[in-house]
């Protein structure tokens, strides 16, 4: 690709290539280049139009915020999902089951989340969950 660009940008190389081509072929190449140029211009115009629309929408919202008395900091908090009221944390659950792990340590389990391996082994051996209740 880099060599093609070098060739197209170099007048001597273009003249050298043109010697091997007919007038019809050269005119056909020019038509194709013009088509590509027009497409590129249309694409750039569309990008500019979309950007202008975006700027207009932003300005409209800026004006609405100003009219409603909302500051940029308040908007940033809203967009970040932060409210001015602090969320209260849920109280930790109390333990419902007591067991002894494989190291001989006494542990507790709330009954939520993954079942401890020591309890699962005892259940597989025939005990019931109520045997571990506190």
Image: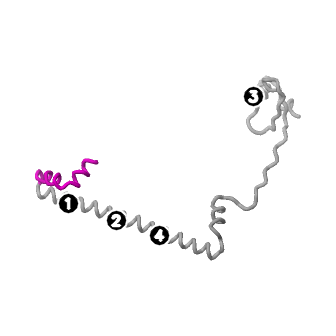
- Spatial distance from mark 2 to mark 1, Cα to Cα? 18 Å
Quarter residue 112 falls in: top right
CA gap between label 4 and label 3 equals: 60 Å
- Above or below residue 94? Residue 119 is above
- Among the two numbered marks 3 and 2 on one chain, the one whose residue lies closer to the N terminus: 2
The range drawn in magenta is 1-21
Of label 1 and label 3, which has the lower sequence position? Answer: 1
Q: Position of residue 94 (x, y in %)?
A: 85, 41
- Looking at the picture, how far across and down is residue 91, in whole percent? 82, 47
Residue reaching furthest to the bottom: 67
- Give the CA separation, mark 2 to mark 4: 16 Å
Q: Which mark is residue 117?
A: 3
Residue at numbered disc 4: 53
Q: Give the mark nearest the N terminus, 2 or 4.
A: 2
The residue that disc 2 covers is 42
Q: CA distance from mark 1 to mark 4?
A: 34 Å
Q: Nearer the viewer, residue 15 or 21?
A: 15
Separation (CA) of disc 3 from disc 2: 66 Å
């Amino acid at each position: 690709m880099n060599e093609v660009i070098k060739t197209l940008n170099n007048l001597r190389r273009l003249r050298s290539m043109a010697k091997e081509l007919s007038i019809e072929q050269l005119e056909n190449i020019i038509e194709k280049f013009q088509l590509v140029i027009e497409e590129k211009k249309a694409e750039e115009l569309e990008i500019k139009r979309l950007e202008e629309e975006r700027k207009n929408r932003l300005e409209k919202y800026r004006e609405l915020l100003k009219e409603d008395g909302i500051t940029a900091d308040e908007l940033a908090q809203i967009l970040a999902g932060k409210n001015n009221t602090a969320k209260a944390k849920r109280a930790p659950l109390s333990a419902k089951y007591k067991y002894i792990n494989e190291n001989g340590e006494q542990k507790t389990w709330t009954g939520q989340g993954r079942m401890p391996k020591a309890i699962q082994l005892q259940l597989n051996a025939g005990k019931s969950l109520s045997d571990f209740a506190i």
